[in-house]
């Protein structure tokens, strides 16, 4: 894993922890301290990461600050006011990684505001690892845990000619390495990344993830919802991408009018204003075939 990928994993792990703090604590002071620390770490990495990643980190840092601000507003709205309340202060978000921010003074009572956190953080508990399998089948029904189990991490390694369906699980992150001639369905990686490495002649369906990065992969189908909007490929060829809501409309829970993904960033394609030859959108025939295959596995 490169330094940029390692920091991306670290960033999303810390982000998940901060969201847990905001969910479980009546005060955002500790969460804001954690956000400030993460903000400083981003500044230290600025020269080592791409402009695309800087934009992603900035957006997520600002969302975390906004979530902390919203949490304090919601809590204050439920308290009884005594005397004159101080004037409301709000965070001002910078164009780049900014200076440390402190908690705003408690505002006057206001109607509750909806948190900007798009997806509730799952109660992640453990890691699910499957490796060195051939002609293997995994479904939620043969899991040792109950349906709806939330895991911190999914790790799939060295799997061939197999079918794996995680229809009732959610994961903090997912890493799939050395996957050949497989069909894999992931229900949700709501706040973290999915890493795909050395995927060959396989179909990977991801109902929801925050970001998707694909390395050293060939001749594979990727159907997904990507929160960042732009999956990333590097050293890949023959990749085909599909929109989850288009191929599986009854299963999609993406907000109405939203895009599953906008475009694909190919880090090895340096010709500006010309579509990368390493990926294309799935055509209707392939989309229908994938829909039929995966729908049968889900029933």
Image (cartoon, rainbow, N blue to C red):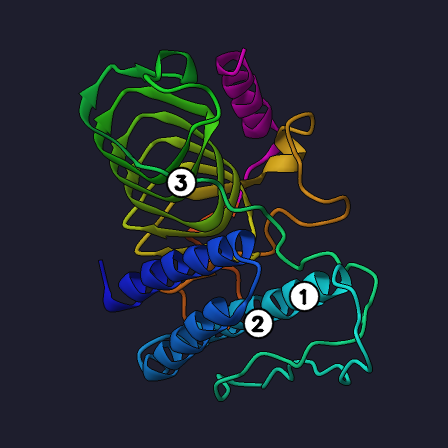
Query: CA separation, marks 3 and 1?
Result: 24 Å
Give how far across and how far down residue 212 sits, in percent. 44, 51
Mostly what secondary structure, the magenta segment? Answer: helix
Residue at the disc numbered 2:
65
In the image: residue 209, left or right of residue 255:
left
Residue at the disc numbered 3:
124
Q: Which mark is residue 70?
A: 1
Sequence-wise, the earlier of marks 3 and 2 is: 2
Query: CA separation, marks 3 and 2?
Result: 23 Å
Q: Which mark is residue 291?
A: none
Badge 1 element? helix
Q: Is residue 97 above or below residue 13?
A: below
Residue 7 sits in quarter: bottom left
Residue 151 sits in quarter: top left
Q: Residue 272 in magenta?
A: no
Sequence-wise, the earlier of marks 1 and 2 is: 2
Q: Quadrant of the N terminus?
A: bottom left
Q: Is residue 200 above or below residue 237?
A: above
Count of numbered circles on the image: 3
In the image: residue 144, left or right of residue 16:
left
> What's drawn in magenta, residue-wise?
281-299
Give how far across and how far down residue 133 sits, in percent. 19, 22
Q: Residues within 10 Å of mark 3 (few under 14, many from 20)?
A: some
Q: Residue furthest front?
A: 82
In the image: residue 96, left or right of residue 37:
right
Q: Residues within 10 Å of mark 2 (few under 14, many from 20)?
A: many
């Amino acid at each position: 894993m490169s330094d940029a990928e390692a920091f991306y994993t670290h960033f999303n792990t810390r982000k998940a922890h901060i969201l847990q703090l905001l969910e479980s604590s009546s005060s955002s002071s500790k969460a804001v301290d954690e956000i400030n620390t993460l903000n400083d770490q981003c500044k230290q990495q600025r020269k080592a990461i791409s402009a695309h990643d800087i934009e992603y980190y900035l957006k997520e840092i600002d969302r975390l600050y906004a979530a902390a601000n919203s949490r304090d507003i919601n809590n204050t709205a439920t308290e009884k006011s005594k005397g004159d309340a101080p004037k409301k202060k709000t965070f001002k978000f910078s164009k780049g990684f900014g200076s440390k921010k402190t908690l705003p003074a408690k505002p006057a009572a206001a109607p509750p505001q909806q948190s900007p956190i798009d997806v509730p953080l799952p109660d992640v508990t453990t890691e699910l690892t499957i490796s060195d399998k051939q002609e293997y089948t995994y479904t939620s029904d043969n899991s040792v845990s109950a349906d709806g189990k939330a895991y911190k991490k999914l790790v799939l390694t060295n799997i061939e000619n197999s079918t794996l369906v995680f229809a009732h699980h959610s994961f903090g992150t997912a890493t799939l390495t050395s996957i050949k001639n497989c069909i894999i369905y992931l229900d949700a990686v709501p706040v973290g990344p999915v890493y795909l490495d050395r995927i060959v002649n396989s179909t990977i369906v991801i109902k929801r993830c925050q970001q998707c990065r694909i390395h050293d992969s060939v001749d594979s189908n990727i159907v997904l919802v990507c929160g960042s909007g732009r999956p990333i490929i590097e050293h890949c060829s023959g990749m085909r991408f599909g929109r989850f809501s288009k191929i599986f409309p009854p299963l999609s829970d993406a907000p109405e009018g939203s895009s599953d993904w906008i475009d694909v960033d190919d880090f090895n394609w340096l010709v500006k204003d010309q579509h990368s030859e390493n990926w294309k959108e799935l055509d209707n025939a392939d989309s229908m075939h994938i829909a039929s295959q995966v729908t049968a596995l889900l029933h």
